[in-house]
Image (cartoon, grey):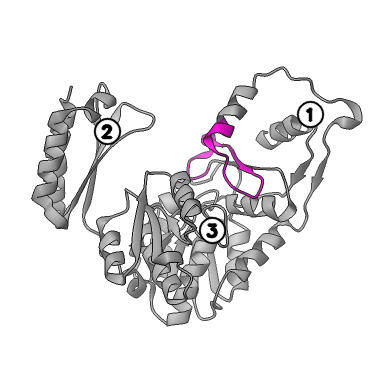
Amino acid sequence: MLEAAVVAGLTSAGADALLVGVLPTPAIAFLVGAVGADLGVMISASHNSMPDNGIKLFAAGGHKLPDAIEDAVEAGIDSAAPRPTGAAIGRVRGLPDAAERYVEHLLAATPAPLAGLRVVVDCAHGSASAVAPETYRKAGADVIALHASPDGLNINDGVGSTHLGPLRAAVREHGADLGIAHDGDADRCLAVDATGAVVDGDQIMATLAVAMRDAGELVDGTLVATVMSNLGLHLAMQDAGITLRTTQVGDRYVLEELRSGGFSLGGEQSGHVVMPRHSTTGDGLLTALRLMARMAATGSSLAELASVVTPLPQVLLNVVVADKAAVADSAAVRDAVEAAQVELGGTGRVLLRPSGTEQLVRVMVEAPTTELAQSTASRLAEVVAVAR
């Protein structure tokens, strides 16, 4: 239904629509540049359930739309501008080799064959259900596909990167070297090592950063991450001689920093990783390929590679408030945060962040022990709750 509506809207305005079928979000971003399109449209629920299906837009070149253009698109939805008629309306055609082009692009970006690796890939019943197993097999891996039967209703339904239990069990059951978990539109990638332990986005970014540093690909020796990345990542990058630059939460801010500084690697703890040399947006398949290539090239297990980061215990509390702006201006909250940070010293971290959509303040504390993180976060949450 959404595809029909998008195509009808575009063609009624005089634009031609090029249909590429079921492909991941990063494939759309790649193809916009590859075919010289003016706009890319991805229809997906992303990492959410089926009722949240919507659209993501990409500008020429495959980049996400700037805020100003998104605002202009929204403002123009209700406009009554004249529409073309007759032969001036747009045309619809297919791009039969769309998936093949994307797979070739991914394989060209993989620095080592994956022969000898057995991987379980959880496709979340999403857009990577066909292309991810195919790509990993063509790269040389022995692939076991999990949750790769989308029916339009089951996307992310208890599976994929937001529900890692089934993947962890399957990796152990099949004696695999690792598991890869994608979300519904496959712009994210989380991993599971051979024991079933979760390898999060911070550990993946650290592994790739060290690999790119060793290959001379890490521009200015810099990794870009958001403020939500664990302090363990900061400490690991410091030990590796890699500069870590942080941004606000959100992949668009990571992308802005990557583009403005010309950096080559960035991402989020959620597994949304961007390598601008190869992709204009987060690409879960590219991330997985590069991670497995590092395993193949070094002969190391994923657990060994991920051990570069020792995550600190992290506690995140959502505090309902009457006015999140008042909390930000509260002297009592500032004093409590400063006191907590002094108490933790260099062994922990405090972050308060207002929700972008609700009257909530998120209190995040990292500390050497879970008990200290919990007690500190609870103490701060009490101050936030009564702030005026």
Q: Residue at x 63, y 70 (%)?
A: 108
- Residue 354 location, x and y as percent? 30, 33
- Residue 228 location, x and y as percent? 32, 48
Q: Secondary structure at mark 2?
A: strand
Q: Report which residue position mark 3 lands on.
A: 276
Viewed as shown, does residue 242 lie left or right of 146? left
Q: Residue at x 45, y 75 (%)?
A: 294
Determine the CA span between mark 3 and mark 2.
Answer: 32 Å
Determine the CA span between mark 1 and mark 3.
Answer: 34 Å
Q: Report which residue position mark 2 lands on.
A: 361
Res 105 → quadrant: bottom right
Circle nearer the N terminus (1, 3): 1
Determine the CA span between mark 1 and mark 2.
Answer: 44 Å
Q: Is residue 325 above or below residue 151?
A: above
Circle nearer the N terminus (1, 2): 1
Viewed as shown, does residue 213 lie left or right of 61? left
Viewed as shown, does residue 202 lie left or right of 96? left
In this rendered view, identify the residue nearer to me: 115 or 235: 235
Q: Which residues are magenta?
A: 46-70
How packed is label 1: few (under 14 Cα within 10 Å), some, or many (20 or more)? some
Q: Is residue 181 above or below residue 343?
A: below
> Which kind of residue does numbered mark 2 sit on?
Val
- Residue 81 location, x and y as percent? 74, 20
> Which kind of residue does numbered mark 1 sit on?
Ser
Where the N terminus falls, by quadrant?
Answer: top right
Callout 1 touching callout 3 (CB < 8 Å): no
Q: Is residue 179 magenta?
A: no
Q: Report which residue position mark 1 lands on.
A: 12
Which residue extends farthest top? 80
Where the C terminus falls, by quadrant?
Answer: top left
Q: Residue at x 23, y 51 (%)?
A: 314
Q: Residue at x 42, y 65 (%)?
A: 220
